[in-house]
Structure formats: structure tokens, C-alpha cells
Amino acid sequence: MNETIAAIATANGIGSIAIIRLSGEKALSIAKQLTCKENFTPRYATLTNIYNNENELIDEAIVIYFQGPYSFTAEDVVEIQCHGGFIVAQSILRAALKAGARLANAGEFSKRAFLNGRIDLSEAEAIAQLIEAKSEDAAKILASQMKGSLKEFIEQVRDEIIHILAYSEVTIDYAEEDLPQDLVVQIESKLKQLYALLEKTLIASKSREGLMQGFKVAIIGKPNVGKSSLLNALLNYNRAIVSDIAGTTRDTIEEQVRIGTHLIRIVDTAGIRESNDEIERIGIQRSLEAIHESDIVIALFDASRVADAQDKEIVKLIASNKEKKEILVVKNKIDLEEKFDLPGLTFDLALNSKSDVTALVKKLEEIMDRNNVSDEIMLISERQISAVETTMQNIQEAFEPLKDQELEIFSFHLNEAVKAMAGITRPFENDEMLDKMFGSFCLGK
């Protein structure tokens, strides 16, 4: 923690501005060395020349000094805003390293902010995910969590459990006395309310997972129903090969497209049918996996062909997933003579994928907007979800010993629940866990 770290904090590539960030006790002295200036007023932008270690001019840049502890890491921090590009930022970073800094590890700035008490883990995860937010609604949720909304919720639940635990611990100290029956009822009622609150939060978080990660949409159907044409229409360019030959798409094709305020991943799958071709068979298996992994499934049928056994298999596939997925059943090629005749199949939409898919785009946007921002707290990572599930399990297991007045066991489960909830914001894990978590962050973050 005594070392001064440095990294480029902006994305690689050509842009108008790049930012080099330094943090640590030598950050200011390194900035003075690179600029040949002696004075920097904290939080004031200073336009100055930047020189390398041979005193050669690299660039004219803006330098901002943030004096610790009033900085992101709670250490002295310097940000150098230079002209963007491949060369300039790298040259300034090399000069900073030669002047005494070392290259930061991925997520090390955020890790220092956490270790110095500047942020907790829930805020750190919100920062990391905000960078990769896939929708405006997700960005709003993450911005709220950066300001501590999830931390406040966790502290509230934790305090409630500790309050209940206090009654039990006091009674254990006076073992000859049992808890009054009315107090047992009150404690049981409070625990049930807490459990219901956590369950509601967990269900809401899982149902809106696509909001954070980006919704995944799979297009399925038998060969030659127009899946690739539909993908091309949604992307507005010819990404997939379109052919009358069955089995042209032999693997899944995945692309991103913006619909409304959401950035979604669309997967064009191989036509689902019986096949003796090994490569095509592998593609079909990947299609089935894509259905399992998707949030929304578009089941496409060809209106110009008589329904056959392959169509019936697709219908069975829809039926087996209708409780788990949002499924849109779409009739394609409506510009041709209609011959499709499968009784009992209800279509959500009818279109011609080669001319106009506006209705489908609107329907997809409508489905995704159902998961929009509400006042509910949302868990944004598997780590947070796992912690809440552990808390709920321990609350559930505490009911039986409470009824039997086995207060040591009851207290044990509540203590485990407190630890699990605290783990979301500031866990008691070791450095290895922290290295693993912050190692997934961007370099310079």
C-alpha cells in the first residue's frame, strides 16, 4: 500500500482525451517531476507541459491533484488529461513509471479505496458494473448503489437481526429463565418479515438479471424459416448468410444491437432438426443451449409451408420452456401464400423478415421495459445473491430452535445470517478473495 501506482484510466484506442491516473504518497512528486512545476492547488485544473525523463516534451495536458484523504482512493491522487491516441498516453505512463511509480494491477485503485474505507464492496461492484451497463435503467440502479442505497438496505437488515439476537444472547446469560412466550411470538414475526423482504428482493433481482447483464434473445426454428434474414433485419446489415439451402447456418451467430434503451445480444441459431451431419448436429446442440441461456426466445415459423414434424418439435420446445422464458411465437413470410396449418398454435406476431420488423422490435422493447427501474433494491452480482440466500437459509433454520427454546443454536444461525449480510458490504474474507474480486475490474479502475 506504500507504493505509488499508475495506469491509463481510459479505453485503448484513438480519442480526443486520455487520462493517466496516479495514486500513492509519491503521486504529487512524480507529477512535479513530469511537469517541471513546483506547485499544484488541490482540485484545480492546471494546464502544463508534460516531459519525459530526458526532459523532452511529450504533450500539453491538464493536471489535477486530489490531496488525500479527499480523493477516490483516500490517498494522494493525480490525474493527467492528455490528448488521446496510442502513443501520447503510453509515453506519459512510461515516464511516470520511470519516475518511481509502478503499473497498477486491474482494479487496484478501487481496491485501495475499499481498504482505506472510502467505499464498501457494494459500491465497488456498482462502479465496475456501471462501466459496462447495458441499459439506461441499469445505469440508474448502479448510480443509486454507488451513492450507498444497497449499503443502507444491508445495514437495516443487519441491524434488525442483531436487535433480535440481543434478546437471545441476554437470555442465554440467564439460562434459568426462558424467553417469555409473547416475546418468542414477536421475534418469530420479525424474522418472518425479514425473510419475506429478502425473498422479495431476491426474486426481483433474479427476474431483472437481464437488465444488468444485457438481455439475450435467441431466434429458433427449423431450417429455412428466415432466422438469418430476421437477424440481418434487426441488425440492419447482412451479418448472416441467407440461402435456400437447409442447414446453411451450422453454428450460433451472436451480435449486439440497441433496442430502445437496452443493449441486447441476439443469437441466430442453427435450424433445429434431425441431422446425420456431425458439424450440423453440434450446431443444433448449441442452439438448444442458447435457448437455455436466453431471456427471450423468438420462435419463428414459415407461413408459406405446410407444418411438418420439425415444426411440431419446435412447438414442444416452446411448451417445455414457456414457464421459464419470455417466448414470442412469430409467423414469417406472410407476403407469400399461407399454407401453415398447425392447430392450437397461437401467434404473437406476423411479419415478413425481409421487409419490416418494426412490430417485433416494439414487442421486444415492451418486454424488456417491464423490468424497468422501481423503488426495489436490486442485487447486482452472484456474490450478493449468494450472500442473501445464505442469510435466508440461516433465518429459516433459526425458527425451529426458537420454538424449542434452544437459544444457543438459534443464536448461532442468526450470527451466521449477520456475517452473510455483512459480507455484501464489508466481508471478513482474506486478501486472496479481495484480489480475485478486484482483479475482474478494468485496469486504471
Image (spheres, rainbow, N blue to C red):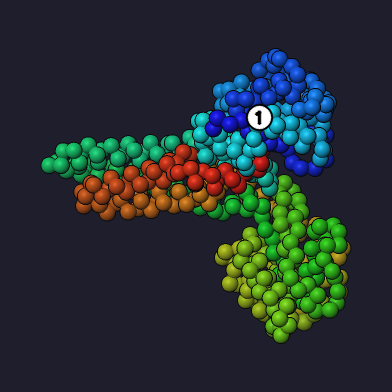
In x, y percent, where is residue 195? 40, 48
- Residue lying at the far left of the rendered structure: 176
In x, y percent, where is residue 211? 63, 50
In x, y percent, where is residue 428? 42, 41
Q: Quadrant of the N terminus?
A: top right
Using the image as rendered, state which of residue 284 and residue 308 is in the foreground. Answer: 284
In x, y percent, where is residue 111? 56, 37
The residue that mark 1 highlights is 100
Can see residue 440? Answer: yes
- Binning the other alpha carbons within 10 Å of mark 1 as few (below 14), some (14 to 19) or many (20 upward) gives some
Q: Quadrant of the rendered structure where residue 66 is? A: top right
- Residue lying at the far bottom of the rendered structure: 276
Disc 1 residue type (three-letter): Gly
Q: Residue at x 38, y 53 (%)?
A: 393
Q: Residue at x 79, y 27 (%)?
A: 54
The answer to whether residue 311 is above or below residue 375 is below
Q: Residue at x 55, y 30 (%)?
A: 2
Q: Quadrant of the rendered structure where residue 230 is? A: bottom right
Q: Quadrant of the C terminus?
A: top right
Q: Residue at x 64, y 51 (%)?
A: 213
Using the image as rendered, state which of residue 117 and residue 95 is in the foreground. Answer: 95
The answer to whether residue 257 is above or below residue 177 is below
Can see residue 204? Answer: no
In this image, 389 relative to 146: left or right? Answer: left
In this image, 24 relative to 426: left or right? Answer: right
